[in-house]
Amino acid sequence: MVAGLSFRTAPVEVREALAVPEGEIHDVLARLRHRGLSEVALVSTCNRVEIYGQAPSEDAGLAAIHAFMAERAPGAVPRDAEHFKRSPHFYLKRHIAAVHHTFRVASSLDSMVVGEPQILGQLKQAYLAAESAATLGSTLERCMSQAFAVAKRVRRETAIAAGAVSISSIACELARKIFGQLDGKRVMLLGAGKMGEAAARKLARMGARLTVVNRSLERAEKLAKACGGTLRPFEDLSDALIDADVVICSTGSPHFVITQEVMKQVTKARRRRPLFIIDIAVPRDVDPRVGGLGNVFLYDVDDLDVVAKANLDARQREADAAERIVQEEVSRFMRWLESLALTPTIVALRQAVQGSLRAELERTLPRLGGLSESDRKALDKMCDAMTNKVLHGPLTALKSQAAEGQGTALLEAVQALFELDRASESLRPNREVSLPPARAPGRNDAAAKSRASDAASEAEDTLALGPAPELAPRQVTSDANAHADGAALRGDTALSSGTQGPETKDPEPRASLKQGPPAKGPAAHSPSGPHSPSLQGAATQGPATQGERS
């Protein structure tokens, strides 16, 4: 089961009320565990608050989650559990729907910006937090681990993360497109706000020689130091424009900061060196008439928005392929989950049949008189052979249906027909039948040990379910535990979601833009010099900065 809310269902005021700071995660997980969730993980970002876990029943899980949320945000969460379930702000996903949601979230298919990479890291952090708090059981661990693998497969097999979709990222990619690479190029950043900071950090990673110009020296100095750049006072703007190769503007000024008059003087001093200006500010920082001056090439936010929309459209097209991958992986996970219920059923079924056969043998033996050792061995083998013969058809059908993800109904039918719950209580794995003593007393028990070993080997052969899945589940230590782990198939609730886990760097996104506005700039340049590209192909890569942030 997954329970929570996101930007799709709830306004920011409700999400803020339920958000859990990082320092409180362990305490919240412990309280949810105490309230009745057997396994639990928590994802809390600015765009979603979700609880993933498992409970003995859906009612118990829902009660625990509702109590926690109502206690944390009494004004935003309905007091009554039934009203909570029907609230448009919250959602509750069960069993296969919960697994499907978890895989979609990890693959960034449920994000505000499809393909953004932040949510996968946040899920991994949630995984680690749950592991540290000892609230991560075998089922939830398997679900989240497979979700990480699904996300990596989606990025490897699709171009869902290709192309920058934030304006600041596209501006930086355009600057790189102009020169091929920015190593050693002089890039001036005008403004040190949020968009300017995002651009500065990206430019620094690209190897640009960064100069920050801002009215507030304190903020500009802090940003320049963080990015390895230099600081120039706002009064030196004209000189900074003369020295720069690329200018990125992102101030919060209500008026033009770079006017036509200023740029006329700057172009004279530059002696026909081309200057590329990327204005991402709203309102604009650069007088649009500047774009008409010789050797000045101006792009504004509308030009970049065309690229962003083209990239988003391309990601949406890739999302269809990603959804197919998610569906395949959900089916694989559900087959594994069904196998948890299959194993104890096979064990109980074998015990029931073998117990009945040996009980009949025990009633018959007194009428046969004393038996030799070889006679007893023959009867033991006969019981085992009859057990295998009787179970061959049912076990083959069970395994076949489970492999196709359709074993639940047949499993329940077998359990009902053979009364396996009652049988499993009365039978024990190594239940022995008292046989009359052998005619040759004094013999050691080597033959008995051999028979026990043979029986164990036959049981292993009978229980074999084929090759292990790609992500091996934790070992089930007892029939009871295995039965409990598979309880979700018989009505128990599996709450699935998470925070972040132990994976490293994701593959770099790929692909290029398909369209953009007309090119601006000189008709031709030398191979070693800059060129003014159209926005087609600009910003082919780059993470979205508008994704989910913790």
Image: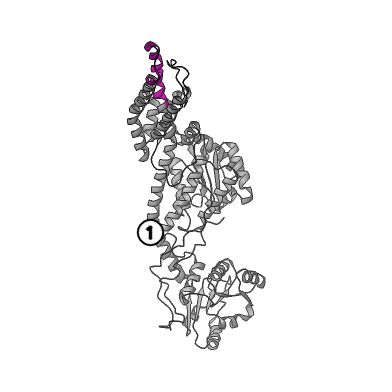
Instruction: Specify whether residue 532 is in view.
Output: yes
Residue 65 horizontal/vertical position (percent): 55, 40
Q: To which quarter of the image does residue 365 belong?
A: top left
For disc 1, the neighbor class at 10 Å (few under 14, some 14 to 19, many from 20) is some
Residue at the extreme right: 218
Q: Main secondary structure of the magenta part?
A: helix
Q: Eyeballing the image, is 467 above or below 152?
A: above
Q: At 36% from the left edge and 34% from the top edge, which residue is drawn? A: 398
Q: Is residue 373 magenta?
A: yes
Which is more toward the observer, 293 or 111? 111
Instruction: Specify whether residue 74 is in view.
Output: no
Q: Eyeballing the image, is 105 above or below 294?
A: above
Magenta-tinted stretch:
351-374
Q: Eyeballing the image, is 343 above or below 131?
A: above
Q: Eyeballing the image, is 50 above or below 378?
A: below
Which is more toward the observer, 21 or 365? 365
Q: How many marks?
A: 1
Q: Quadrant of the C terminus?
A: bottom right
Q: Amino acid at mark 1?
A: Arg
Q: Is residue 399 left or right of residue 214?
A: left
Which is more toward the observer, 483 or 257? 483
Badge 1 is on which residue? 317
Residue 392 horizontal/vertical position (percent): 33, 30
Q: Is residue 27 magenta?
A: no
* Tag 1 secondary structure: helix
Residue 39 horizontal/vertical position (percent): 54, 40
Which is more toward the observer, 463 or 441? 441
Residue 314 horizontal/vertical position (percent): 40, 62
